[in-house]
Amino acid sequence: MTHPRNDLLLRALLRQPTERTPIWIMRQAGRYLPEYNQTRTRAGDFLSLCKNPDLATEVTLQPLARFRLDAAILFSDILTIPDAMGLGLYFAEGEGPKFERPLRAEWEIRSLSAPDPSVHLSYVMSAVSQIRRALDNSVPLIGFAGSPFTLACYMVEGRGGTDFSVIKKMLYQRPDLLHHILEINARAVTDYLNAQIEAGAQAVMIFDTWGGVLSNAAFNVFSLQYMQRIVEGLTRHKDGAEIPVVLFTKGGGQWLERLAATGCNALGLDWSTDLAGARQRVGSQVALQGNLDPAILLTDPDTIAAEAAKTLESFGYGHGHVFNLGHGISQFVPPENVHALVEAVHQLSPAYHQV
Ligand code: CP3
């Protein structure tokens, strides 16, 4: 009896019939919520919040207490893996993530190894099982990780917000070194996601946030290939249920056919991709998740409802759509605008499922 009472998300990701379109929001537990900021202050900082399973559980549930969302997503970060590899992750206030020891020298790269999730990332697995207990089978819990390439961007550059010149130089001059990092990352992500599934994650998503900065040829070799390996290595069935896998390459709209061919169940789309066109291209193979421009949430309830209607209309009639933003929610969004979005999807989407 571990199946969630509201399983719309799981069914939609598997392209099974649903009565309406499920909705969750990337970064739904985050700084736009005053109660999140309070809990983060109690934790001390963002990383301490991630590493405290009680508080991580608390913030995971916060958006669900406010809005009629159809899924919870583990509160954590993609950079827990490089942190567990010993790179020294820290978040400088207002500056995003940084590493004390980025990977530059060949000997540093050669001594890298995949962390054992049950040792170095046990706090994440504790959070997953605690969140599952707290959810009490109400909605499914999504686990996640970064893609090998996206993790490598932070590990090599040493910080976010760069022009990717260091990793691109490595890609073209020393592809052997980058491949070494990516192989270890792929092993680490596979083990990490399987541990999350073992601990209770009911769907998993791989964030390839920076795959879109690669050239057409380099995307296959340095990102797609490694995500494919992960998809092939994941536990896809547990306790009689299928565990859907979602791949999200931001800026990857031109590569949807290749992403769908990895054997994943669903693709995340950013707002630059036309949902109707994407469905025509890959909709018989995978479900689609997205793709409202996150900036729309900065407007007003009427505009938000009108834009949500356009997104639903763009996917059209039938199943296999999970409503989401095209990327994470901004910290400047008024919570009542999220309420307007969630309610609009509840109200408008049943019409598209009466088929
Ligand atoms: O969706 C959720 O609610 C789950 C939580 C989640 C976080 N990070 C929490 C977070 C998820 C799924 C992530 C993924 C993540 N982290 C990605 C991939 C998705 C994406 O957004 O592209 C990336 C690239 C990271 C790395 C990272 N973590 C960055 C670049 C930053 C700074 C960004 C910012 O908004 O300042 C973070 C910090 C972070 N991760 C925050 C949250 C809620 C904000 C930290 C804070 O509270 O100060």
Image (cartoon, rainbow, N blue to C red):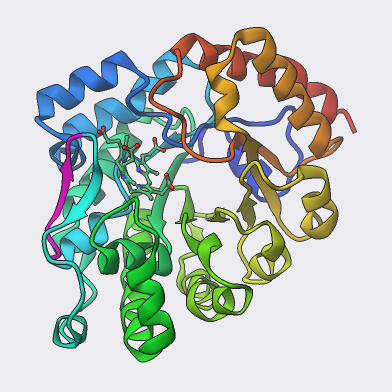
Q: Residue at left 17%, top 68%?
A: 85
Is 292 situated above or below 238?
Answer: above
As drawn, 342 above or below 108: above
Taking the magenta stretch, the answer to whether it contains residue 301 is: no
Q: Residue furthest right?
A: 355
Q: Quadrant of residue 141?
A: top left
- In this image, 110 relative to 32: left or right? left
Q: Quadrant of residue 289?
A: top right
Q: Along the horizontal axis of the image, is 133 left or right of 202?
A: left
Query: Which of the 4 image quarters holds residue 130?
Result: top left
- Name the spot of residue 26 as percent of width and height, x first: 48, 37
On the image, the x and y values in percent for residue 19 come to 75, 28
Which residue is at 65% across, 41% downward?
A: 271
Q: Is 21 rendered above or below residue 114?
A: above
Say whether residue 277 is left or right of residue 106: right
* Residue under the image location 11 percent in, 23 percent down: 42
Q: Dividing the image into 4 quarters, which one contains the C terminus?
A: top right
Magenta extent: 86-93
Numbered disc total: 0
Q: Is residue 106 visible?
A: yes
Q: Is residue 8 visible?
A: no
* Residue ID at (61%, 45%): 270
| Ligand 1 shown in quarter | top left
Place of residue 275 in the rendered image (x, y in percent of width and height, measured from the top left): 76, 44
> In terms of depth relative to the viewer, which is nearer, 152 or 42?
152
- Residue 345, above or below 208: above
